[in-house]
Image (tube, rainbow, N blue to C red):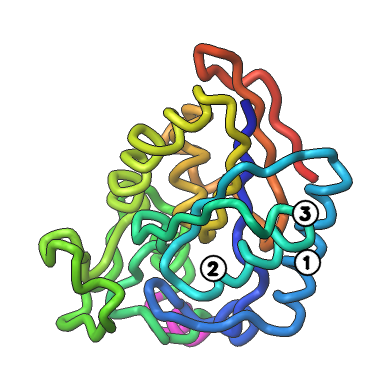
Amino acid sequence: MKLILVRHGESEANFQNYWTGWLDVDLTEKGIQQARDAGNKIKQAGLTIDLAYESVLKRSIKTAKMILQEAGAYFVPEYKTWRLNERHYGALVGKNKELMTQYFGADQVKKWRRGFDEVPPLTKDNHFDRRYDQLDSRLIPKGESLHMTSRRVVPLWQDQLVPNLLNRKTILVCGHGNSLRALVQFLEEIPIDQVDKIDIPNATPMVYTFNSQLEIIEKEIL
């Protein structure tokens, strides 16, 4: 039973160094190539993907589609879910990280980026499109800590990923830096005071192998 976690390829926001959150930005040319390379690595490792989960943001969707194409699995079912969206960075969305470091200080910015319970300044209003029309407005945040992100990611694991793993499916999960950090922290039972050490590089497949009790028996970085 295998779970493949991949953060999207380099996005325009990664390149320009600003907070993205639920802002829908595209991949750079480098990010596109990274996604293709990730698919090739998965294929070369002999992994056969049975289904894929993505966020509702195009940097995740495009990365997943290119991975599936390169891995020879472009025909498998794909499921899009807001639960895999990047952490909502509130009023910091669209702000340059270096400028915010100068304004708020390096320690505070590090807490926002790497802490577990630190909530960024909340935005007053969200300006989202129809992709969230069917979502209960009470579930749409105006800013999230990593802990809050975890509370929306873990139900995806429990309700959808676990049943498919138990059905012997190999699953690709293409998410974002913080949604995957939250899932990794949960799966590996990493202490809260060590979550700042979890690093999720762009387009780098992490392959978890589980036994029948869903205990991790191997983790491989491709």
Q: Amino acid at mark 2?
A: Ile
First along the sequence among labels 3 and 2 = 2
Pointer 2 residue: 61
Depth check: 218 or 17 in front?
A: 218
Outermost residue to the right: 44
Quarter of the figure with the C terminus = top right
Displayed quadrant of residue 130: bottom left
- Which stretch is magenta? 98-104
Please state if 34 lies on the left or on the right of 183 as rendered: right
Q: CA distance from mark 3 to mark 2?
A: 15 Å
Would residue 162 be found to the left or right of residue 168 on screen? left
Question: SS of the residue at dot 1?
Answer: helix
* Magenta stretch: helix, strand or loop mostly: helix
Residue in the image at 50% along x and 83% along y: 25
Task: Kindly check if marks 1 and 3 are in contact, taking CB atoms under 8 A apart as contact.
Answer: no
Q: Which mark is residue 169?
A: none
